[in-house]
Amino acid sequence: MAVGTIPTVKICGLQSVEVLKSIVHLPIAHIGIVFAPSKRQVTPEKAAELIAYLKTEEANGQIVPRTAGVFVNPTKEQLIEILAVAPLDIVQLHSQETPSFCGWVREHFGVSVFKSISISKAEDRIPSSAEVAAQLDPYIGNVDAILLDTFDPVYGGGSGKTFAWDCIPVYQAWARAAGVQLLVAGGLRHDNVDQLVLAYAPDGVDVSSSVETDGVKDIAKITAFVERVTRK
C-alpha cells in the first residue's frame, strides 16, 4: 500500500442483520460471514439474509461492504451448495487449499478469492523472500489477496492473538510484485491497529473478536476500530 493510503477494513464474524444495519454507514470495505466451524458460524440461509439486506441498501444508493465467506478446507460440493443460497462476493479460504482449488473457486463462481496464510505466534525468524516465493508463487493468478493471520491449531485463524509483525514486509514485497492485496488479521484492536498501519501499511486490516462484548458484535467497539484505522 502506498504511504498515506488508508487501508480497507474488514469486520469478520457478522451474524445479525440488526448489527449490520448499525454499521453499514461506516467506511467498511468487507464483512466476513463464517461458514467454518466456529462460535460465529452461520447457516447459508442466515448469510442470505445479510446479503439481501446489503443488496437492498445498495439499490437505494448506499455504498455497502462486499461479503466474504470464510471457509476451512471446503469441498467443491459444499461451496456449490452454499453459494447457491448465499451469493457471496468473496470466498476466503483458511487452511490447506491448493492454488488449483483457489483458481477453480475464482473461475467457477466469478468471485474474488482471499487466501489466508497462518503465521505461528512462536515463529522465531523471518522467512526469506525465496521461502515466501516458494510458498506463494503458485497462487499468482489464483487469488486476489493474501491474509496474514495468527495460526490457530483448531480453526486455522481467528485466535484473537497477534503474530510477530516484523515478518510482514517480506510478504508485502511479494504481494506487491505479484499484484495482489495484503491484509493483516490476528489480535488487532482499536489501541494497536494504528501502530500496525503506521509501521507496515497493509492494504487492509481484519478484525473480529476484539470488536465483541460477551461474544456479540459491539457497535461502539466496531466504530472505534474503524475510526482509528480510517482517520487521517
Image (spheres, rainbow, N blue to C red):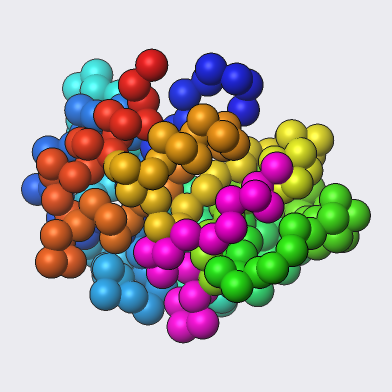
Name the side, left or right, on which 149 lies relative to 27: right
Name the side, left or right, on which 45 lies relative to 172: left
- Depth check: give the residue in front, 230 or 58: 230
What main secondary structure does the magenta stretch of the protein show? loop
* Residue lying furthest bottom: 154
Name the side, left or right, on which 42 lies relative to 220: right
Relative vertical location of residue 24 with respect to residue 232 in this rendering, above or below: below
Can you give x and y, in whole percent of width and height, for residue 145 in the image?
62, 45
- Residue 99 forms part of the magenta stretch: no
* Residue 113 shows up from this direction: no
Can you give x and y, in whole percent of width and height, for residue 203 in the image?
56, 34
In the rendered view of the protein, which quadrant contains the N terminus?
top right
Relative vertical location of residue 96 with respect to residue 139 in this rendering, above or below: below
Identify the magenta region: 152-169
Q: Residue at x 81, y 35 (%)?
A: 177
* Residue 39 shows up from this direction: yes
Relative vertical location of residue 96 with respect to residue 144 in this rendering, above or below: below
Can you give x and y, in whole percent of width and height, for residue 54 in the image?
25, 38
Q: Residue at x 20, y 22 (%)?
A: 60
Name the side, left or right, on which 12 lies relative to 80: left
Can you give x and y, in whole percent of width and height, for residue 207 in the image?
36, 51
Q: Residue at x 50, y 40 (%)?
A: 196
